[in-house]
Image (cartoon, grey):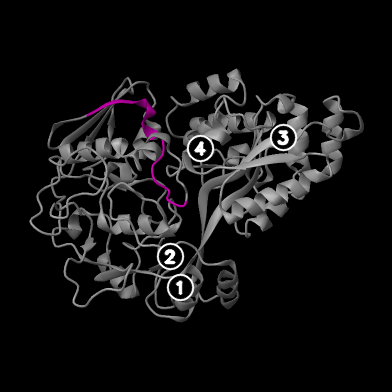
Amino acid sequence: MLAPSSPSLDPHRVRDAAGAMAHGIAFRQLYVHVPERAEAVPDLAAGDAEISEDRLTITVPVRRTGRFGPADGRRITARDVEHGLERALADPVAGPPARRLLGAIDGLGPVGLWRDVEGISAPDDDRLVLRLRAPAPETVLEGLATAASTPVPAELPRTGGDLPADVPVFSGPYAPSPDPPAPLAPGTVRFDRNPAWRRDSDPRPAYPGRITFQREPRRQAAWRVLAGDGLVLAPAAPPEVARIARRRDSGQLAVSPLPVTRYVALNPRAVALRDVHVRRALIAGLDRDLLLRAAGGGGAIASHYLPPSVPGHDESGGVDGTGAPELREPSGDPRRAASELRLAGIEGGRYDGPPLPAVRGDSGADAAVARAARESWREMGVRLRVDVLRGAALRAACTSRTSRYAVCLSASAGTAAADPEVLLRPAVRGRAGTRVDAAMAASAELPAGELRSRAWAGINRAAVDMAIGAPWRWDERPLLVSRDVIGAVDERAGTWDLAFTSLDARARRAAR
């Protein structure tokens, strides 16, 4: 396995695609998503979670067959899972995402599922109990199918940081080799079979006998995968290599949609953008196709906030969108923009106000998208005064009700849980009006299914109608394997699922 970075071996800090792939083979969770299955399946859980009649308590049965490894491992109990959940929430790195539920998406860690959890306990070795503040268990259940539910031994401290090297914590089918037969190159991690793992207790077949992560520059690694044997690439194939693989039609390329929407956020509380017609003018005048190309291509032009892999997408109009006229033309509609400005009382249909305070991320792609937005709006008379932020400061600037920025050029909404509430809430709350906030509170209590999807599609439509931003891309990731690799895609993380990937088709059939 070739990746531009070494995978993290922390049970909760899943920072990037390589980390997600390593986590999937080295650790277990209560529930896991497996290829070609829409719903998560029990992993360490002994079956489906039980929800109380008042929907305020979730009880999860825990298997008796899970064990820590690789050496002298003991049985994993509900107390270890409870300890892992508490540690994930307290961790200075994993905690914020675990409390917000957005997958970074290059890390797709759990983000924000836990605002409704009042308490977590393990009354005995076989049961985990979560008590909720509100009757809304759906997003919490999704959180139990993320890295946040990875167990760690209950005797360890609850604080984050590195775990002791002499304590067995690896619960999955593989564990880092403590004594490789030869010295490994810098940045290389070799995973061998975990002797404490039992195949009959795990939904993952774990075909390979050994998996090695090797750090290598992405472009160089992609060419090696295209020409080599037994290799997969993380996180994504560069566009030029993906084009060659697509032309060859050799089965080496898989394109994985991601539950992520990129958008330019518009702050209705900013003085210059309080009029909805001004916001609609900015959306109409934005060349979203130019932004997509500036970001390096890949993905599809977004027509609203819910991407194809998230419930509520079809109910929102699918790829055709909600019908909002300002989003009909991917390359922008100057006439519509001018018309909206005149409706806002701006004579001549050209913006004549001061520069708008804006913010973007610090990556090269963020800078390119910002330049494309400036170019789109220049003909409208719109100027930007752009600051550069990163991490939590950028997220707050893009979503906070009190943000001093009128425009966020690097906004994104995503979910590791493929749940519309988790994706929409941070982007919409406090920005689309009190009625929409009230609708979100009511829709949060709906059980998964058609009614919940329709309700959140209505919130999505309201967000589009209130013009709180310009969705411009639904993300996808091109994945590359060597010719002799039978790859399986982890659709939630947008990576290869190494526990389902094999070199020999006969091995796959034999394990079924």
Q: Amino acid at mark 1?
A: Ala
Q: Amino acid at mark 2?
A: Pro
N-terminal of the pair, mark 4 or mark 1, is: 1
Query: How far is mark 3 from mark 2, CA to CA?
Result: 37 Å
Of residues 344 and 326, the one nearer the viewer is 344
- Residue 110, magenta (yes or no): yes
Q: Secondary structure at mark 3?
A: strand
Q: Residues within 10 Å of mark 4 (few under 14, many from 20)?
A: few
Q: Does 428 sit above or below residue 262?
A: above
N-terminal of the pair, mark 4 or mark 2, is: 2
Q: Secondary structure at mark 1?
A: helix
Q: Amino acid at mark 4?
A: Ala
Where does the image place residue 300, in percent across and percent down from the top left? 63, 53
Q: Does 500 sit above or below residue 413?
A: below
Q: Quadrant of the C terminus?
A: bottom left
Of residues 181 and 320, the one nearer the viewer is 181
Q: Quadrant of the N terminus?
A: bottom left
N-terminal of the pair, mark 3 or mark 4, is: 3
Q: Read off the residue under disc 1.
A: 221
Q: Read off the residue under disc 2.
A: 4
N-terminal of the pair, mark 1 or mark 3, is: 1
Q: Residues within 10 Å of mark 1 (few under 14, many from 20)?
A: many
Q: Read off the residue under disc 3.
A: 356
